[in-house]
Amino acid sequence: MTRINFFQEQVRGFSYQKMILLSVSIILFFSMIVFFQYFRLRSASEDLIDLESQIDLIKVAQGLSTKGSEVQLNPVEQVAVAMISEPAWSDMLRVISKSLSEGIWLEAIHGDSSEGGLLTIQGTAYQARLVPGFLDRLRSYNVFSNVLLLSSEATLKEVDAPLKFKVQAKPRSK
C-alpha cells in the first residue's frame, strides 16, 4: 500500500501545502470582496430610501403630492416642510435694498406668508420722479412677479414736495 504525503516538500513546482494555502487565500480574498460589495449595496439602498423620503417631503411642501395628507409628519418634518414652503425673504429684502436709490427712504415693509409672501412697502421719495425708477429696478431683478404702486400722495402741496408711496410686490413662485 502506497501512502502519499501531501505536506512533503516537492522538488519541482508547488507543494500540496502551498497549493492549499494559495487556494484558501484566493477564496478568502474573493469572499471578502463579495461581503464588502453586499454591505455597500445595503448602505446605498438605505441612503436611497432616505433620499426618497426627503423628495416626498419636498413634494408635499410644494403641493405636488397628496401623500402628505394621509401621512402624519413628525415635528422635524413639519419644520422642514414649513421652511421649504416659505418664500425667500432674504432674496426679496436683498433686491429691495439694491433697488433703493438716493432720495428714497423706506418706512415699513410688511410681509404676509399666508398669501405666498406678498410684500407691502411703504416709503417716502424726495421727488415724485424717483418712484417709477424704484419700481422698474424691483421688476428688473426677476424676484417679483408683480410690482404695483398702490398709492402715492404728496406730503405738501408743492410740486417738488416729498412723496409718500405704497408698493405691493408679489414674489415669483419657486
Image (spheres, helix red, strand yellow):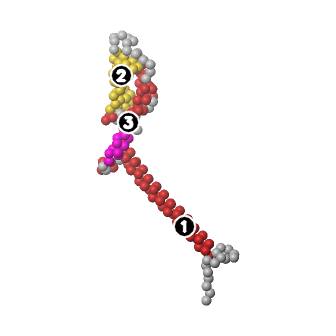
Magenta extent? 73-85
Residue 32, magenta (yes or no): no
Query: Image point 31% across, 35% down: which residue?
Result: 114
- Mark 3 = which residue? 87
| Image location of residue 6, percent across then percent down | 61, 78
Name the main secondary structure of what is drawn in magenta.
helix
Residues at discs 3 and 2 in contact (Cβ within 8 Å): no
The answer to whether 19 appears left or right of 144 in the picture is right
Does residue 103 lie above or below 41 as drawn? above
Query: Image point 61% across, 85% down: which residue?
Result: 3
**Picture quadrant where residue 90 is located:** top left
- Mark 2 = which residue? 107
Query: Image point 32% across, 32% down: which residue?
Result: 112
SS state under label 3: loop
The answer to whether 63 appears left or right of 25 in the picture is left
Tell me the distance, in whole angstroms, between the alpha carbons under discs 3 and 2. Answer: 22 Å
- Mark 1 = which residue? 28
Q: Nearer the viewer, mark 3 or mark 2?
A: 2
Work out whether mark 1 precedes mark 3 in sequence or the reverse, and give the earlier one. 1
Residues at discs 1 and 3 in contact (Cβ within 8 Å): no
Disc 1: CA contacts within 10 A as few (<14), some (14-19) or many (>=20): few
Disc 2: CA contacts within 10 A as few (<14), some (14-19) or many (>=20): few
Does residue 41 lie above or below 109 as drawn? below
In the picture, the quarter occupied by the N terminus is: bottom right
Q: Amino acid at mark 3?
A: Pro
